[in-house]
Image: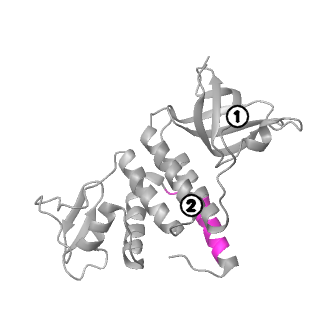
C-alpha cells in the first residue's frame, strides 16, 4: 500500500468498463505510471471533475502490478488555464510524454520542466512555439538523448557562428559544406544551447532540430495532437511555423 501522496499530472485518460478510468500519469517521484480509478465515471463521483489533464493533483495508490489502483485523489489547485493554441500545445506535450517516457523511472527534473512549460503556456508570455521548443530540448536531455550544441563532434572545436554544421543522430554536430540546406549555422546552434530563440529563423531551426532528434524515438505512428494543431490552424486561418 502506498501511504504517500504524490504530486501528479494526468497525461491521458480513457474509460475502462462503464464506471472506471485508466489514467496515464506523470508523477514527481515515480515518473510515468498507469492507474485504474475505480468508479470515477459514476454520476455521483467527485473524482470525475478533477481527474483531468493539466490539473495539479495529489494522489495515493496501491498495488504491485503494472497498473496500480487509485486510493485517493485531491486537486492541489484548479486546472492550469490553457486555451486555443496553448491548449493544443499542452496536448502535444502530454502526448510526447505518453509516447516517450518508459514507466517507473524517476524523472523528477522533468516533472518541474513540465510544470514550467505548462506555466509558460498558461501565461502566454512567449509564443507557444518557444515554450514547446524549450521543453522538447529538456526532454531530449532527460531521456539521455541530449547533444552538445557548442562543439564539433569530430574535432572538439567550439562551434563558430558563421560556419554550417550537420546533425549526426545521437552523436552530435559535424562541420558541413556552406550550401548545406539541411545544415544548421553555428549561430543557430548557440541559440539552441541557450534555449533562447530571439527570432523566427532560430525558432524554425529549433523546430527542425527537435523534429529530427525526436522522430526515431516516436516511431511511425503520427501524433494525434499534430493533426489537431493543423485542424485548429485551418479553422482559425492562422499559420504557425
In this view of the protein, can residue 185 be seen by the observer? no
- Quadrant of res 176: bottom left
| Residue at 72% in and 41% down | 51
Mark 2 highlights which residue? 121
Which label sits on residue 219?
none
Question: Seen in the image, is 164 located left or right of residue 233?
Answer: left
Q: What is the span of residues highlighted in magenta in the rendered image?
A: 220-233
Return the x and y of residue 89 as percentages of the image width and height: 58, 62
Looking at the image, how many numbered discs can be counted on the residues? 2
Q: Nearer the viewer, residue 152 or 52?
A: 52
- Could you tell me how far apart the alpha carbons at marks 1 and 2 are, in whole angstroms? 23 Å
**Rendered image quadrant of residue 88:** bottom right
Indicate left or right for 134 with 183 as reference: right
Mark 1 Cα within 10 Å, few/some/many (few <14, many 20+)?
some
Q: Main secondary structure of the magenta part?
A: helix
The residue under label 1 is 74
Residue that sits furthest to the top in the current view = 1
Residue 80: percent from left, percent from top:
64, 52
Is 229 magenta? The answer is yes
Residue 5: in magenta span: no
Q: In this picture, is 65 found above or below 84? A: above
Residue 114 x %, y %: 51, 49
Which comes before the other along the chain, label 1 or label 2?
1
Residue 106 lies, with reference to residue 241, above or below; the image says: above
| Label 1 SS | strand
Q: Residues within 10 Å of mark 2 (few under 14, many from 20)?
A: many
Q: Is residue 88 shown above or below 107?
A: below
**In which quadrant of the rendered view does residue 1 lie?**
top right
Amino acid at each position: 500500500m502506498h501511504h504517500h501522496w504524490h504530486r501528479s499530472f494526468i497525461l491521458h485518460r480513457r474509460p475502462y468498463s462503464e464506471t472506471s478510468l485508466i489514467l496515464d500519469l506523470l508523477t514527481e517521484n515515480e515518473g510515468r505510471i498507469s492507474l485504474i480509478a475505480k468508479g470515477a465515471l459514476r454520476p455521483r463521483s467527485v473524482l470525475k471533475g478533477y481527474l483531468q489533464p493539466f490539473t495539479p493533483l495529489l494522489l495515493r495508490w496501491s498495488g504491485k502490478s503494472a497498473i496500480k489502483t487509485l486510493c485517493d485523489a485531491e486537486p492541489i489547485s484548479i486546472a492550469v488555464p490553457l486555451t486555443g493554441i496553448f491548449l493544443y500545445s499542452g496536448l502535444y506535450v502530454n502526448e510526447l510524454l505518453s509516447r516517450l517516457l518508459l514507466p517507473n523511472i524517476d524523472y523528477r527534473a522533468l516533472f518541474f520542466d513540465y510544470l514550467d512549460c505548462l506555466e509558460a503556456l498558461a501565461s502566454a508570455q512567449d509564443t507557444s512555439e518557444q515554450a514547446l521548443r524549450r521543453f522538447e530540448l529538456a526532454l531530449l536531455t532527460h531521456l539521455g538523448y541530449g547533444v552538445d550544441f557548442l562543439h564539433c563532434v569530430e574535432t572538439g572545436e567550439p562551434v563558430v557562428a558563421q560556419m554550417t554544421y550537420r546533425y549526426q543522430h545521437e552523436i552530435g554536430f559535424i562541420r558541413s559544406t556552406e550550401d548545406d540546406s539541411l545544415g544548421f549555422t553555428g549561430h543557430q546552434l548557440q541559440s539552441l544551447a541557450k534555449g533562447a530563440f530571439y527570432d523566427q529563423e532560430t525558432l524554425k531551426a529549433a523546430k527542425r532540430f527537435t523534429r529530427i532528434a525526436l522522430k526515431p524515438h516516436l516511431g511511425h505512428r503520427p501524433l494525434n495532437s499534430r493533426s489537431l494543431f493543423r485542424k485548429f490552424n485551418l479553422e482559425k486561418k492562422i499559420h504557425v511555423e
